[in-house]
Amino acid sequence: MTTNHQFKLAARPVGNVKRSDFTYTDEPVRDPADGELVVKILYVSLDPAMRGWMNESKASYMPPVAIGEVMRAIAVGRVVASKNPQFAVGDHVNGLLGVQEYAYSNGQGLAKVDPKLAPLPLYLGTLGMPGLTAYFGLLDVGQPKAGDTVVVSGAAGAVGSVVGQIAKIKGARVVGIAGGADKCRYLVEQLGFDAAIDYKSEDVAAALKTHCPNGVDVYFDNVGGDILDAVLMRLARGARIVICGAISQYNATAPVKGPTNYLQLLVNRAAMKGIMVADYYPRAMEAIVEMGGWIAAGKLKSREDIDEGLENFPETFAKLFSGENNGKLVLKVAAD
């Protein structure tokens, strides 16, 4: 009998997520019911948004994961049994399949992917939710023009690295903010950013003044907190700020720190707007086709940081908040 190992939420984390916030359980894999399919999970996507899903707060775009439920996560896998006419055994799919080895689905919210066109982890990164977030957040909300100065925080991460590269493709000047000299070198030497600021060793406000002498036209924010405040003081007239995330605040035990310098929006006639990728899912193929073309042409690079072993989920997830990961963080669960 095949066994399904799962991570279930055992407690609401306080501060950093710990292994004790989960229970690691197993149960037999059953046959699918009518209309269902069973997916063998191959890779699990580890994303900052998962931290918010663990909280009780109703101030999220999705309901919290209930205590005792399998931890919610996007994953990609292969259909191993099906009583759903839309999916055949052998199909590869991705969707909210959870942190486990096997998942049951009625097919809603699942998308077929083709491992012959791109490696499966790419469908969790540049050709998945992070890439779609970057594409639509920058182009629809940020609306960069050729010659604009675009600043992106969390620039070496799954979303930020794509944002910066798309901005370069569109003719913008791009400044990335990341943690550590290696990440900053990667942004400039490998991804073609015009400049990079190491928030761990540099004065971000002073560096922004140096690298953005005419102000910031578009700011794509993945971190919030002090870095958001620093960028607000360098806005150009008519700037657009894209709020994608605030990873600096997700493990905070005090109330979330909002922007102190928000009046710069008034002074500079600037706009701040959030991006929720789910709003753009009906247009997903538009982004996937264009980004796929850029990847094929060598204009868009992708880097995946792949750890192995479902049992290592809590420790691997923690890398997102310590800054240890390089690129899109993925957990390999099984071979195809």
Image (spheres, rainbow, N blue to C red):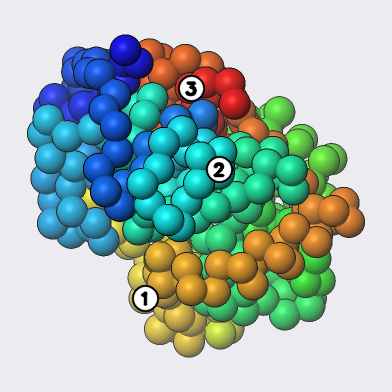
Percent position of residue 85, x then y: 42, 56
**Residue ID for mark 3:** 333
Dot 2 or dot 3: first in sequence order is 2
Q: Residue at x 41, y 72 (%)?
A: 279
- Report the residue at 27% width, 48% height from top: 34
**Residue 50, quarter of picture:** top left
- The residue wearing badge 1 is 263
Q: Name the front one of labels 1 and 3.
A: 3
Q: Earlier in the sequence, mark 2 or mark 1?
A: 2
Along the line of sight, the residue nearer the viewer: 179 or 161: 161
- Front disc: 2 or 3: 2
Viewer-proximal residue among 128 and 243: 128
Amino acid marked by disc 3: Val
Residue at the (48%, 81%) spot, across then down:
270
Residue, disc 2:
92
Between the residue at mark 2 and the residue at mark 1, the CA separation in whole angstroms equals: 48 Å
| Contact, mark 1 vs mark 3 (Cβ under 8 Å) | no
Question: Residue 152, percent across and down?
Answer: 59, 56
Q: Nearer the viewer, residue 287 or 217?
A: 287
Residue name at image x 48 percent, y 73 percent = 282
Give the x, y percent position of residue 63: 18, 53
